[in-house]
Image (tube, rainbow, N blue to C red):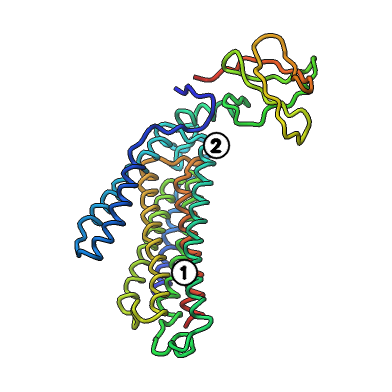
Amino acid sequence: MAHQAHAYHMVDPSPWPLTGAIAALLMTSGLAVWFHFHSTTLMILGTILLLLTMFQWWRDVVREGTFQGHHTPPVQKGLRYGMILFITSEVFFFLGFFWAFYHSSLAPTPELGGCWPPTGITTLDPFEVPLLNTAVLLASGVTVTWAHHSIMEGERKQAIQSLALTIALGFYFTFLQAMEYYEAPFTIADGVYGSTFFVATGFHGLHVIIGSMFLAVCLLRQIHFHFTSEHHFGFEAAAWYWHFVDVVWLFLYISIYWWGS
Amino acid sequence: MAARLLIRSAVRAATTCRAAPVPALTRGMAAGGIPTDEEQATGMERIVMKAMKEGADPYSMMKPKEYAGSKADPHLVPSITNKRIVGCVCEEDNTAVVWFWLHDGEAQRCPSCGSHYKLVAHELPH
């Protein structure tokens, strides 16, 4: 089978990096076309290409790892480093938005009334839906840990149930947050308060949706017997990402919803 | 309120499936339903898994073994062909590495520090 003298994986040539790059080009130029010429065609084309790229690239990773056995211990270690580095980059991404929030809220300008929350802003009560959202995400952290232990202990039914419950909690969070967005007494156009609130919580919500999708793929893979009790890194990566999303929410809740109210 | 109801039903769901049969620690599929690497690992992963279980290291994943480097206990250098490049760091923290080809046959000595190196055949589990 292997004609290599090392345990690493020299990946076969693949078209997906190219299609991904083309998708990025079409999406960005499509965004500019949308702004200037009021047509969304190019951007939508780019988005479709991006979705196709992600689906086929990650399907190839699953084929290489689970079906062809290329993910030896050194390869798995590399994948772990990769996921950790990616999550770290996402931490820095959110740090920027927290920086923006604290920059504006710690020394509120005269235009805002010299106070935070700014004059005229009715903030959301942190002890209503935001607190429920906190409980929902914390509970989902428990259920995803339950799923992990179920996999390690060979409990198929419990793994499927706890993973499904985690995804359900994720969807519940997204639903509640969507309701909050609809009912909020302020918009993104309401000064720097609106900007920092909706950009920070908006990107967080996007990451919840991404995390839920990742977990959903793991659920499908678990149902199809891809994971073994010792080797299930795809699931671990999804769980790490989910915990990261949970932690970001906790910081958002403490900073923007509670202290900022 | 809604959260409390949700948590309560989650607890109920958690406790009901505890009524499953006692999980055996042997065959994952027969008992809990999740396969083990022993049952399902394939390809390179399986080869490496089997080799590690026997203590072998065909793909040189571990640190090389330590030898005295003397005539009686030369550094054994595994090779898949009949020669391999050796880089000798004669003394610890030396920044100049002494590179040379090591050929099959009699042990060779490092041109700088004189340590003995001997090529040995290395079998790959194809």
Q: Position of residue A3 (x, y in %)?
A: 47, 21
Question: In the picture, residue A199 is in which quadrant?
Answer: bottom left
Q: Are marks 1 and 2 on the same chain?
A: yes
Judging depth in this view, the residue of B84 and A151 nearest the camera is B84
Residue A30 lies left or right of residue A247; in this view the side is: left
Label 2's element?
helix
Q: Amino acid at mark 2?
A: Pro
Q: Is residue B14 above or below residue B6?
A: above
Q: Residues within 10 Å of mark 2 (few under 14, many from 20)?
A: some
Give the crowd class for mark 1: few <14, some 14-19, many >=20 residues within 10 Å: some
Q: Nearer the viewer, residue A74 or B82?
A: B82
Q: Nearer the viewer, residue B19 or A159?
A: A159
Identify which residue is drawn at 45% across, 75% down: A131
Residue A122 lies in quadrant: bottom left
Nearer the observer, disc 1 or disc 2?
1
Q: Which mark is residue A97?
A: 1
| Cα gap from disc 1 to disc 2, whole angstroms | 36 Å
**Rendered location of residue A90, percent (x, y):** 47, 58
